[in-house]
Image: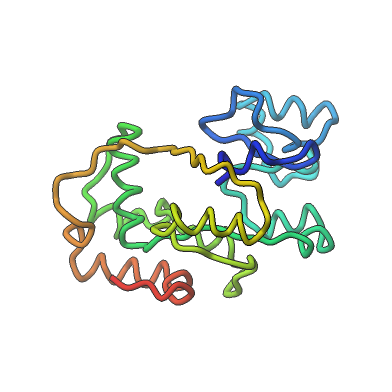
Amino acid sequence: MESALGPLCGLQDIITPMESNWNTAIPKNFHDQHLLAKTYAKSRLLRKCIHRHSKLIGSWYYEHMPASRVRELIGEEIWNSYHKFCYERNPWAKVVSYYNWKKNGQNRSMPSFREYVLNKSHRLPLDARLYFDEEQCIVDEVLDYESFQTSFPLLCQRLDIPFTGIIPREKTGIKQEKLGNYQQYYDEETKQKIANLFHREISLMSYQY
């Protein structure tokens, strides 16, 4: 969405850095303009030493930033003036895709899928924490990932956004293990583990295994 909406953003809008745009002219307004903030944006070492929520660097906007943190930085008045939306995906399918992205897209040495789900739960894409505040969803709208091709243009039309029809694609072309659909990765224990960990988005979106 960031890649699709970026060209439509104004001079004062915020576009955060991400893997595909870090060394381009696309990110903007994602940090303060004092010396430490500018240095922090350029130095990976400094970013490892100073937490991105530190008051030393001021306002720092980043990829996969929790909505609660955005609200804290921009203030209630601006927050309430915007339509906040995001996309979510069936968590059982999302975890399989994420696992394959790590294994095949980033060529990481990965444990078995079962071990990954049961013993590496802190590494799973628990994205509800990005748009929930505790048990409350704090964005205006959550749409399903599978409907993106049709729902995103309709959303732009509803919000009077001059969408060009071009939807950039990122992190695609990663081969999936030849095991058929995502259900074949799971047994009862891993299936229930995902149900427990992702209970907020499952309840919100009525996802089913």
Which residue occupies 61% across, 50% down? Answer: 65
Which residue occupies 77% across, 43% down? Answer: 59
Query: Where 164 falls versus 199 (above or below)?
Result: above
Q: Nearer the viewer, residue 144 or 110?
A: 144
Which residue occupies 69% across, 29% down? Answer: 41
Q: In the picture, residue 176 is in which quadrant?
A: top left
Horizontal and vertical percent position of residue 166: 51, 39
Q: Is residue 87 left or right of residue 81?
A: left
Horizontal and vertical percent position of residue 19: 52, 32
Query: Where 168 falls versus 81 (above or below)?
Result: above
Q: Is residue 193 left or right of residue 186?
A: right
**Which quadrant does the C terminus fall into?**
bottom left
Horizontal and vertical percent position of residue 17: 61, 35
Horizontal and vertical percent position of residue 136: 61, 74
Which residue occupies 66% across, 29% down? Answer: 46
Q: Is residue 170 left or right of residue 77?
A: left
Q: How is the image coloured?
A: rainbow
Q: Nearer the viewer, residue 196 or 180?
A: 180
Residue that sits furthest to the left in the current view: 179
Q: In the picture, residue 47 is in which quadrant?
A: top right
Q: Nearer the viewer, residue 106 or 155?
A: 155
